[in-house]
Image (tube, rainbow, N blue to C red):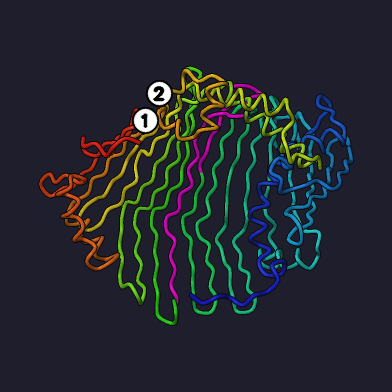
Amino acid sequence: MTTPRSTPRRSRWPVLALAGLLALGALAGATAYTSTQTAQTQQDLARTLQAQIEATGYAHITSSTYQRGLLGSTQTLGVTVGKGEGAEALIVVNHIQHGPFPGFRAVGNAVIDTEVRFADRALQAKVEQALGGRPPVIHTVVGLSGATSTHLEVPAGRFSEDGAVLSWQALKGDVVNTGLSSTARLNWPELMFSSDGDTLTVSGLSLVGSSRKQGADDPLGVGQQTVSVKAVTFSGTSDGAPARLRLGDLQVGSESALSGGFYSGSVRYGVGQFSASLADSGEQMLSDLQLQLSLNHLSRAPLARMVKTLGSLGEQARAGADVSGLSAAQEKALTADALAVLNGQPVFSLDRLSFKLPGGEMMLSGQLDLPGAASLTPETAQLLADTPEAALGMLRAKAHFEAPEAALRGLLESVEPGAARSLGQMIEAGYLKRQGGQLTSDLAFGDGRATINGQPLGGF
């Protein structure tokens, strides 16, 4: 794959930054509304926005002005995004129309139209040229209850420099926030980048998510998010030879839930189809790649306290305080809460790692838990910390593997010629079991002992 010629980042792809900054604009619009019933001061508005965007550690408010009118107001924020030499200065302007009939376009507390632009005029001019003079849309309606609904749009555009071209179709999204719950939906039909004969295309990108909190002070919340991509394709050269790569039906998702005072979370990754054609390896094809991981039975109360403690450390660091070490109180609190989480006997699971070859599907699953953790005390926990090998007696683990023998042999041979011969030795030793054309293996560990397919592997 050829490497595009190097140019300064600021002048090369400002539009990439613009797409990411839509979230900043949406957040600014959703928090900036005001009316006669919610007469927040300029400082209150700045603090509200600052508390939310600076929590990322990536954006910082440098200035804030607020001009109040009878029917409308304007809030202008100076924001720095990024760190060091890569930081960009932005200007965020919220044009606010007050309720209860804001701009005579809706019924609610306010309607906010937000514009985000680069402070660097030359950079902003390049963005405007790339978008064909059509500005992005960030439109927020604040209901009478305080709920916000924000609509985002980035027009289709094209940016080129030094022979490299970035083009995209229009991006659209909606975010609804009712205080304790929120939903988000975003769609980006296509993004294409080409340089020196290489072309990368991302098509059918979408994001769907929802979250819900138990209360205003809930640092965890529950919900689900899914990012999906219809296809990622590359065509060009690799080491001077033609090369093609395609990933189809990609999905990345997460889900969290609360049941009986215990918190659980899972993540999943999936690729529907994978194909690659490279000069040194020929045509390679896989399908239905899946990775699913979960962490269950986490005691919610101590976990929430840990998140709050760590969050306060982050706030102190962003405020410039020295957080190189924990205070005695923080260390004591985190240790007690971590022990309480362990007492709840959490369970980590590899729910599925699998992929399909022409000869069939290979799959691995497993689970790790701590049945002995329920009786842990501060004293025994310290003992285990000092002698980690003693903690093995608390662990319980199991794993299961299965694959068609023909497919496994073919995979091993493609990796290293002759490697498939070791399968016969593993079957004879009992590490693999043959059941018809299928090979399976079950590994278990508990009480400091390991077995494979029921055969002991010796004590640990």
Secondary structure, mark 2, is helix
**Residue wearing tag 2:** 371
Side (left or right) of 452 relative to 232: left
**Residue wearing tag 1:** 396
Q: Quadrant of residue 147?
A: top right
**Observer-nearest residue: 137 or 126?**
126
The residue sitting at 48% across, 43% down in the picture is: 226
From the image, give the main secondary structure of the stretch colored magenta.
Answer: strand
Secondary structure, mark 1, is strand
* Quadrant containing the C terminus in the rendered view: top left
**Observer-nearest residue: 264 or 72?**
264
Categorize mark 1 by other alpha carbons within 10 Å: few (<14), some (14-19), many (20+).
many
How far from the left and from the top, in percent, is residue 170?
57, 57
Q: Residue furthest left?
A: 436
The residue sitting at 47% across, 33% down in the picture is: 265
Instruction: Compare marks 1 and 2 and give the one earlier in the sequence.
Output: 2
How far from the left and from the top, in percent, is residue 74?
84, 43
The residue sitting at 50% across, 42% down in the picture is: 208
**Observer-nearest residue: 162 or 294?**
294
Q: Quadrant of residue 110?
A: top right
Q: Amino acid at mark 1?
A: Arg
Side (left or right) of 120 relative to 338: right
Magenta segment boundaries in residue numbering: 208-236
